[in-house]
Amino acid sequence: MEKLSLFLGCIVPNRYPGIEKATKLCLQKLEVDASDLPGASCCPAPGVFKSFDKATWLALASRNIVLSEKMERDILTVCNGCYGSLADANIELKKDPEMKARTNTCLKEIGMEFKGTTEVRHIIEFLYKEFGPEKLKGFITTPLDLRVALHYGCHLIKPSKERNLGETEAPEFFDELVEATGAKSVDYTDKMMCCGAGGGVRSGHAAESLEMLEHKLACIRNAKVDCIVNACPFCHLQFDKGQLAVNEKFGTDYSIPVLHYSQLLGLALGFSPDELGIEQNAVQNIEFLAKIYEISAGLKSTTQC
Amino acid sequence: MSEELLKVLKAAGLDILSCMHCGTCTGSCPSGRHTGLNTRRIIRDARKNRATVLSDDALWLCTTCYTCQERCPRGIPITDAILELRRLAVREGFMLPEHRLVSKMVLECGHAVPLDEETKKKREELGLDPIPETVQKYPEALEGLKILLKTCKFDELVAEK
């Protein structure tokens, strides 16, 4: 299916609308046919709801999938968590007729039926497979002279069995998409480590979650980057809001800007930082904002990488 | 319940019997480096049918990053087994208050993280509709979602026992 529906989830529309705006602007510019998905709910978040009750997890996920099936569009997510729930539920329901029948018994109560006619895509996987870094470069109008600490996040690539995105220890596809914008993806210690938010740990065990985050931030700071780039609003929230909480808890002074890939790509496609909601983050790094406004206005030479 | 642990896991396609206790899971765990989570111990306790594994708070320190599962030399679906153990724990009434709260949010608003006034303003600043195109905008869709959750008896499952 070439037509997509944009699945927002919770954190994008309800906490970081800049990611929603940036994604819509990028998709328009790339001429991708992506509509809204009216009436969609929480995916539901895999770390918590899949940990509580599988039938409920499948019922809510399949309801969201059915909304897209009815529109005859594949679902596009911009969140690793939503991808983890929707893609995994979609695969399980397509593979297991018994599970599908049980889930459809629940869906029947609201006049819905899961048919299994749609695919679930993640924006990074979609851009890599449908565009690829070389084609994407053709759209770039504002090459970004930025050093980036890329955070893949977990559920974009794991569990790897059904993802078809290659190995999980040192993947490169996302780095290639970052470098297509002109930015440099800088290697750093424990790059593939989790941000510490998933699995209900951020909500249930906040102190431990922040300890994991602090380790990650220390590694990133050592790499001397301009910003962190992610593809998951929950990782985004952990890195952004969590960074302030880490500073309070550990007496540190981290001020590392955090961008979703849609926002990074948006800059490279010529949109300004305020159109992309970058200033709405909790972390306010004036130096970085000045830098991206300069790049955006074409004041800074982008050839001295 | 304890006697059933292995059977329930196996019925869910999660065979943990081939574990050789090499410790790759624990050594790979990003949470275990900072917290009391010892993945190998959880798998061992489940294998030995120790009911205490369900009341063990460490079960909730896993971020479900799947690194242990990816690296397990025996190919044991460790993270999926932890998720199954969590579901059994919830059925036994072991659930953190914060997780009951997240569940309440979904039961009431259809979102684990619902819209707030601050974000409405941010949306307007960006030229977006203050209310996003989700279940929050469509009362009939929210009503349907609530019926679905009730059909699954999710409200009963997460209610304070």
Image (spheres, coloured by chain):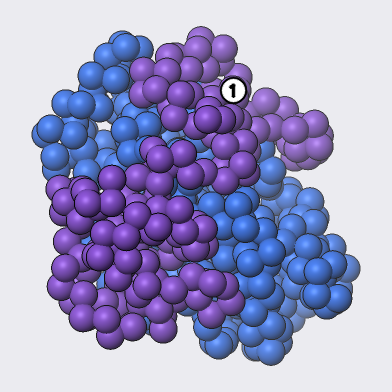
Q: Can residue B79 be seen in this view?
A: yes
* Rendered position, A182 above or below A244: below
Please tell me in which quadrant of the rendered image residue A154 appears.
Answer: bottom left
Q: Is residue A259 visible?
A: no
Residue at image location 37% in from the left, 67% down from the top: B42
Q: The blue chain is which one?
A: A
Please tell me in which quadrant of the rendered image residue A235 appears.
Answer: bottom right
Task: Indicate left or right for A151 with B21 as reference.
Answer: right
Image quadrant holding the N terminus of chain B, namely: top left
Most foreground residue, B20 or B104: B20
Most foreground residue, A189 or A180: A189
| Residue A2 coordinates in the image, percent (x, y) | 31, 41
Inspect the image, locate mark 1, and give the three-letter code of the amino acid beneath it. Answer: Glu
Q: How many marks?
A: 1
Most foreground residue, B91 or A248: B91
Q: Which residue lies furthest to the left in this view?
A: A97
| Residue A131 coordinates in the image, percent (x, y) | 37, 60
Residue at image location 48% in from the left, 17% down from the top: B146
Q: The purple chain is which one?
A: B
Residue at image location 61% in from the left, 42% down from the top: B97
* Rendered position, B116 above or below A277: above
Residue at image location 67% in from the left, 25% down from the top: B131
| Residue A297 coordinates in the image, percent (x, y) | 79, 64
Please tell me in which quadrant of the rendered image residue A181 appears.
Answer: bottom right
Say which element carries label 1: helix
Q: Mark 1 points at which residue?
A: B108
| Residue B112 coordinates in the image, percent (x, y) | 57, 37
